[in-house]
Amino acid sequence: MLYPELFKQLESVRWNMDTDIPWASFDASKLTDEQAQTIKMNAITEWAALPATEMFLRDNKDDSDFSAFISIWFFEEQKHALVLMEYLRRFRPDLLPTEKELHEVRFEFEPAPPLETLMLHFCGEIRLNHWYRCASEWHTEPVIKQIYTQLSQDEARHGGAYLRYMRRALGNFGDQAKTAFAKIGVLMASARRTAQALHPTNLHVNKNLFPRDTIQSRLPDPEWLEHWLDTQIHFDSAWEGKVVDRILHNLSLLMEQSFKTVQELNRYRKELNREMAESATPGAKPQTV
């Protein structure tokens, strides 16, 4: 089991909201209304760990080890929402999210293949780590800069934990896991070729609720995420390149291959699909996916 070791590791670096956040250093002159509004939106998106946890537990009923780890992930992600709300409570109480606004992002996600979901959230942690690092640089008020740095470090550790479960999955499921990870890796590392950066926040997860079937669509301002990334924190191509590089680097280590580009990863994915098709139907003509 990975859970006992991960519990000890994450417990040893867990920060305390009362003593590790420099609340006394707050400088009101360095917090703009625009910045404060983004803190509210991020607090609500972090609250969405609640429906994601319900999804993980439902779709991983046969995996008690991973489900136990989700108790840590859920606690730390909800703590992210809490520390952002505490910041607003102390310094901008007029922007504190209401319980109704928080509850809006709790809705049922459709069942999805656990291996693909695992890879999706691994990539999501990498992306969020970089988003929060970029946000910390954009902010000018010292306390919120420290909070975003703290959150970014948590997201990096969460990504590392997901990677441990991905490595375990390769041992348990072999090419099935490789195919799932490569498929989602190509999708998540291709953001520069899509209209928006892909993250669990803006993916469609319940077609019956369309068009309000993403976390983003249920925020008080559904247009906020792209505006935050493009216009406010300026998450540009250089930052996006860092995300892609980390995804490809980790998949290279995991698959014991070398992926310098998304195109190389996609060729590997197609080759895996061909090999699996040939194994399933010996003598059949392989199909290009």
Image (tube, grey):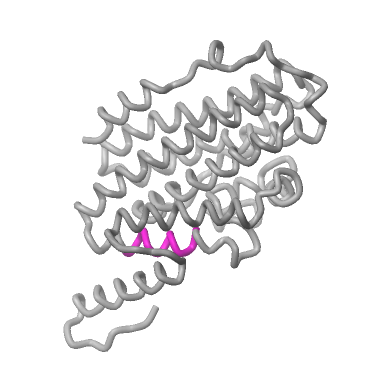
In the displayed structure, 138 sits above or below 217; it is above
- Give the image quarter of residue 8: top left
Q: Position of residue 265 (x, y in %)?
A: 40, 67
- Give the image quarter of residue 260: bottom left
Q: Position of residue 52 (x, y in %)?
A: 48, 41
Left or right of 127 in this view: 278: left
Q: Position of residue 105 (x, y in %)?
A: 60, 40
Query: Residue at image x 69%, y 14%?
Result: 25
Instruction: For the C terminus, give its image quadrant.
Output: bottom left
Q: Which residues are magenta?
A: 179-188
- The tally of labels here is 0
- Give the image quarter of residue 1: top left
In the displayed structure, 9 sits above or below 284; it is above
Given residues 10 and 243, the one toward you in this image is 243
Query: Residue at image x 48%, y 19%?
Result: 15
Give the main secondary structure, helix, strand or loop, of the magenta stretch. helix
Task: Tell me, yes or no, whether the highlighted magenta stretch contains residue 177.
Answer: no
Given residues 41 and 208, the one toward you in this image is 41
Query: Residue at image x 28%, y 32%?
Result: 3
Q: Position of residue 223 (x, y in %)?
A: 73, 50
